[in-house]
Amino acid sequence: MPIAVCPGSFDPITLGHLDIIERATYIYDSVVVGIAGSPSKKPLFSLKERLELTGEALKGLKTVKVEPFDRLLVEFAKKNGAGVIIKGLRAISDFEHEFQMAHLNKNLDSSLETVFMMASPEFMFLSSSAVKEIAQYGGNVSDFVPANVEARLRAKYNQR
Ligand code: ADP
């Protein structure tokens, strides 16, 4: 199968994101991870930091590239020659929003298909926002994020 895009804010990338991206590489020849600026979400990490952290965390996956995007997802996919959008689906809470986005994107570009991958059970309840909240109060996030992200969270929150 050819090219898939995997979009998100990745603020920061977690082991849940990594799991979806790695599984996508077993199905698609090439996976483009698209990092949205998401200014309205007031990200903790700048787009530049998120590109860096995500790139480092994924450097073992040779068929993955990481790109920023600040346009419609369907345009970003087309620009990268992708026919598929990959989304991870966690517990029921993701469903409504993702269902809506998939239909809107289909309407904008009917040649583009959204494919959902079920979150692995160990990451089902993991989110970037939960990770940030735990890290902010000095909790241990080593089971949830790659080592480079853990170190950067400590630095961000001024912890040893
Ligand atoms: P978040 O929802 O944590 O802020 P993003 O906006 O970066 O994350 O999400 C990008 C994509 O990654 C979405 O499709 C989302 O469902 C998926 N995703 C996020 N966390 C997980 C996880 N723990 N397991 C599987 N998929 C996930």
Image (tube, rainbow, N blue to C red):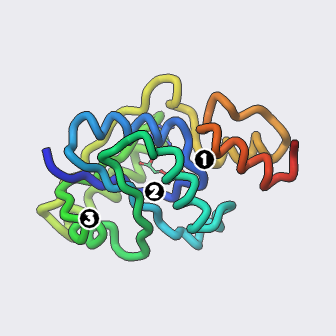
- Crowding near the residue tagged with mark 1, few <14, some 14–19, many ≥20 C-alpha atoms within 10 Å: some
In the displayed orientation, state which residue is furthest to the top. 121
* Residue 128 tag number: 1
Q: Can you give x and y, in whole percent of width and height, for residue 70 in the image?
A: 43, 75
Mark 1: which amino acid? Ser
**Residue found at x 21% / y 43%:** 28
| Pointer 1 or 2: first along the chain | 2
Where 99 sits versus 147, above or below?
below
Q: How many marks?
A: 3
**Residue found at x 12% / y 62%:** 111
Where 40 sits versus 83, above or below?
below
**Residue found at x 60% / y 47%:** 128
User: Which residue, given by chain and number where applicable, does mark 2 sit on?
Assistant: 8
Secondary structure of residue under mark 1 = helix
Where 8 sits versus 117, above or below?
below
Q: Is mark 3 within 8 Å of ligand 1?
A: no
Disc 1 from disc 2: Cα separation: 11 Å
Q: Is mark 1 within 8 Å of ligand 1?
A: yes
| Most foreground residue, 47 or 134 | 47
Mark 2: which amino acid? Gly
| Most foreground residue, 95 or 153 | 153
Secondary structure of residue under mark 2 = strand
Whether the residues at callouts 1 and 3 have beta carbons within 8 Å, the answer is no
User: Which residue, given by chain and number where applicable, does mark 3 sit on?
Assistant: 77
Disc 2 from disc 3: Cα separation: 13 Å
| Most foreground residue, 127 or 5 | 5
Q: What is the quadrant of the N terminus in the image?
A: top left
